[in-house]
């Protein structure tokens, strides 16, 4: 299920989407892979980040464009993207705070096998 983060946005995405915030659609890693597999020559932005002070670990944020939305997800491990995907590595994603909060929720669920 997804949640509208702005009253002016009408959700028009699949029921498995996690949240619609502004023009960002935050989804699970599995849903992201399903969506990317439907695109011809998808452009996928990946932002690898080291997290933690004591227990350092890598997390991966992914973004692509779909139907006028920026579709994003976060994963504790690299995703196996389709071979035809053009992958660009970036240093940072600039997004509203609500998107980051939802991405952290998606990451926690993925780490616990709930995605």
Image (spheres, rainbow, N blue to C red):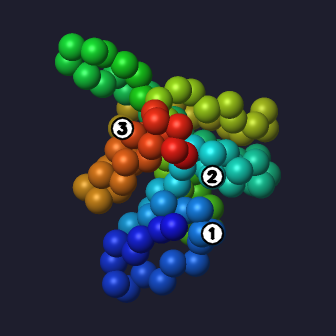
Residue 50 lies, in percent from the top left, at 34, 22
Residue 38 higher or lower than 112, as above or below: below
User: Which residue is painted at 58% across and 57% down in the image?
Assistant: 65
User: Quick one: SS at disc 3?
Assistant: loop
Disc 2 to disc 3, how far (Cα)?
Answer: 22 Å
Q: Identify the mark nearer the N-term, 2 or 3.
A: 2
User: Quick one: SS at disc 1?
Assistant: loop
Residue 92, which numbered label? 3
Residue 12 lies, in percent from the top left, at 58, 78
Disc 1 to disc 3, how far (Cα)?
Answer: 27 Å
Residue 14, which numbered label? 1
CB atoms of marks 2 and 1 within 8 Å: yes
Q: In this view, does 30 lie to the left or right of 83?
A: left
- Does residue 15 appear in this view? yes
In the picture of the structure, the residue carrying the numbered disc 2 is 31
Instruction: For label 2, count other residues whose C-alpha is less than 10 Å away and answer few (under 14), some (14-19) or many (20+).
Output: some
Nearer to the camera, 55 or 22: 55
């Amino acid at each position: 299920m997804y949640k509208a983060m702005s009253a002016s946005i009408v959700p028009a995405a699949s029921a498995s989407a996690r949240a619609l915030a502004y023009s960002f659609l935050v989804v699970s890693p599995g849903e992201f892979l399903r969506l990317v597999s439907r695109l011809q020559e998808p452009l996928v932005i990946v932002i690898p980040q080291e997290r933690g002070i004591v227990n350092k670990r890598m997390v991966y944020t992914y973004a692509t464009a779909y139907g006028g939305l920026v579709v994003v997800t976060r994963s504790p491990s690299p995703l196996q993207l389709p071979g035809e995907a053009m992958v660009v590595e970036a240093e940072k994603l600039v997004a509203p705070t609500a998107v980051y909060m939802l991405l952290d929720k998606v990451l926690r669920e993925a780490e616990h096998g709930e995605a």
